């Protein structure tokens, strides 16, 4: 098959041609304190894209000082209308230049260019949401039982310096959960993007300064989690931490944050149940469930990696999802026809392949994928979309987060059985149910212990509604008015008249 390759823009090409990418602190590119670098490779080709500065605790300290100075300086005098106007300018900037950032993201982390460019509408909605939130921060006037003539109220004030630790699996939009809230509330931030995919963050923060973002409000320190990430989480002058990533790393951040009792916003791992009843519309459920796991090559925290299927249709469902996969094209992230790109790195590919071997050895029935892709894909980090049937909850592939294009089909016999299996996990990030019976669907929604549930769809997110985590999938809202809780603190005021 002839595939059409997307040609990147001159601006994105010029950025990538730098080769060596500095930190971005106090409105400017600055070198790291040490001379170490981190190699950046294109997951589709194994080719070197460039090198990141390996930021250290010293660099984090410099960035935090810049963020604190900005928080206490001119930025603190910006009104909510000023900050909203800045977000409007950010919206216009994204509208004009989103494709440039999407191109860098696709080259850096391997997501198909059709997917990254397709996330434009979602990113713009997030900017609109936070622009609205800039005028929605308010306290309350409250009654009290105090003697005398006392007026009582609460005020909402920006928390201060936010440490933002961004995941590699979608930094193009993930950074807006932090940057948007910072711009809406008047906080400042130091961002630590993942070493696997930092380039789109560096580029976007740099061009945001073209629209009047004050220096020091948003800073970027690239580097390893054990160095820059730990230094940010444990820094005594960082007031809050917003983190998206694995549950194991989340535990480390909780420990590091104890130094000054930081409040945390954590979106962690998942092993989400996607429950398909026999009365479901399979013409919708099959592609919906398939892309609920294989979108972004399975590298999504809330991926539907366990598809629970009513036993009477389990064989048919497996056959249909295997057939559907044949319609998906695997290839380079820059090919416009690609549906499934590579996984993020060579090391991660080996991890995913080890889970596929575990599934085989534990007796799961392999009905699609499981093999290395065609040699025509070259040295990229590709893993064929893989489907196991007749999986039970004793198997590793059913219990552990694989974070790759591997799904387990688990049969169930009744609604109660589906709910029991769905909740049989330490995670509680997401889930879905497919059924024409709205009573059945709503009962499952009510009883699955997860922070977000979908009915007859998968993966829809609107920042106005948002989502949450439960159990070991974290805490702190993403989206909705509750999202701003991480970026604000409440001040109680008593006025004796």
Image (cartoon, helix red, strand yellow):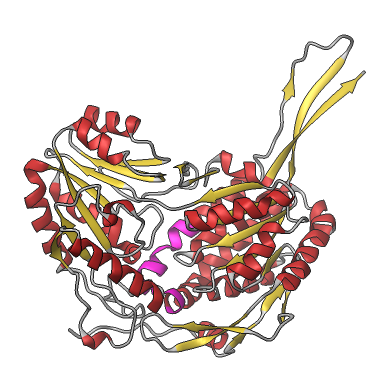
Q: Is residue 225 left or right of residue 463?
A: right
Q: Find the magenta span and give its range.
A: 107-123
Residue 110 lies within the magenta run: yes
Nearer-the-camera pick, 238 or 4? 238
Report x, y in % for residue 232.
68, 62
Q: Quadrant of residue 202?
A: bottom right
Q: Is residue 219 left or right of residue 131?
A: right
Q: State whether residue 203 is above or below residue 355.
A: below
Using the rendered image of the protein, determine whether residue 190 is visible from the camera's viewpoint.
Answer: no
Rendered residue at 55%/62% (across/down)? 166
Closer-to-camera residue (1/124): 1
Name which residue lies at 22% across and 79% down. Answer: 373
* Residue 333, horizontal then vertical, whole percent: 35, 77
User: Is 316 located above or below residue 326 in the figure?
Assistant: above
| 263 with respect to 403 (left or right) | right
The reply to whether residue 115 is visible in this rendering is: yes
Q: Nearer the viewer, residue 366 or 8?
A: 366
Describe residue 273's horizontal placement relative to residue 144 as left or right. left
Picture coordinates of residue 366, whole percent (x, y): 14, 63
Dominant secondary structure of the residues highlighted in magenta in the image? helix
Q: Quadrant of the C terminus?
A: top right
Quarter where residue 470 is shown:
top left
The N terminus sits in image quarter: bottom left
Q: Residue 472, percent across and down?
A: 46, 45
Residue 26 within the segment the image draws in magenta: no
Extreme residue in the right direction: 497
Image quadrant assignment for residue 210: bottom right
Q: Nearer the viewer, residue 193 or 407?
A: 407
């Amino acid at each position: 098959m002839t595939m059409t390759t997307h040609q990147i823009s001159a601006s994105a090409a010029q950025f990538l041609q730098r080769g060596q990418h500095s930190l971005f602190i106090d409105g400017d590119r600055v070198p790291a304190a040490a001379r170490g670098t981190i190699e950046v490779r294109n997951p589709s080709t194994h080719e070197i894209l460039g090198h990141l500065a390996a930021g250290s605790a010293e660099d984090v300290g410099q960035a935090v000082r810049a963020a604190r100075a900005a928080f206490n300086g001119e930025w603190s005098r910006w009104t909510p209308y000023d900050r909203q106007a800045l977000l409007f300018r950010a919206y216009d900037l994204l509208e004009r230049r989103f494709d440039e950032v999407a191109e860098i993201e696709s080259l850096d982390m391997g997501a198909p260019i059709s997917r990254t460019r397709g996330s434009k509408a979602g990113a713009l909605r997030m900017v609109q949401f936070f622009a609205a939130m800039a005028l929605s921060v308010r306290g309350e006037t409250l009654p009290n039982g105090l003697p005398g003539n006392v007026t009582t109220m609460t005020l909402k004030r920006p928390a201060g310096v936010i440490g933002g630790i961004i995941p590699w699996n979608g930094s193009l939009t993930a950074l807006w959960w932090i940057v948007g809230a910072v711009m809406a509330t008047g906080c400042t931030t130091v961002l630590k993007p993942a070493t696997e995919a930092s380039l789109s963050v560096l580029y976007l923060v740099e061009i945001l300064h073209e629209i009047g973002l004050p220096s020091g409000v948003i800073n970027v320190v690239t580097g390893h989690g054990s160095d820059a990430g730990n230094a940010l989480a444990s820094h005594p002058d960082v007031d809050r931490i917003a983190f998206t990533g694995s549950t194991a790393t989340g535990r480390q951040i909780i420990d590091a944050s104890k130094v000054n009792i930081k409040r945390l916003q954590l979106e962690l791992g998942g092993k989400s149940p996607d429950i398909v009843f026999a009365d479901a519309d399979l013409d919708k459920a099959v592609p919906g469930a398939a892309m609920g796991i294989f979108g972004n090559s399975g590298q999504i925290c809330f991926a539907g990696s366990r598809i629970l299927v009513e036993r009477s249709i389990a064989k048919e469902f497996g056959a249909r999802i295997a057939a559907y996969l044949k319609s998906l094209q695997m290839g380079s992230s820059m090919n416009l026809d690609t549906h499934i790109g590579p996984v993020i790195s060579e090391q991660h590919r080996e991890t995913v392949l080890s889970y596929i071997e575990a599934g085989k050895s534990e007796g799961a029935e392999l009905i699609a994928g499981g093999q290395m892709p065609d040699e025509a894909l070259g040295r990229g980090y590709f893993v064929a979309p893989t489907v196991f049937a007749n999986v039970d909850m004793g198997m590793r592939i059913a219990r552990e987060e694989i974070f790759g294009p591997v799904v387990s089909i688990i049969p169930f016999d009744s609604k109660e059985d589906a709910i029991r299996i769905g909740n049989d996990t330490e995670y509680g990030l997401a889930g879905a149910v497919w059924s024409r019976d709205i009573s059945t669907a709503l009962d499952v929604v009510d009883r699955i212990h997860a922070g977000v549930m979908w009915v007859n769809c998968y993966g829809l997110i609107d920042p106005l509604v948002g989502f949450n985590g439960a159990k070991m999938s974290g805490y702190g809202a993403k989206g909705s008015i509750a999202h701003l809780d991480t970026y604000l603190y409440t001040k109680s005021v008593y006025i004796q008249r």
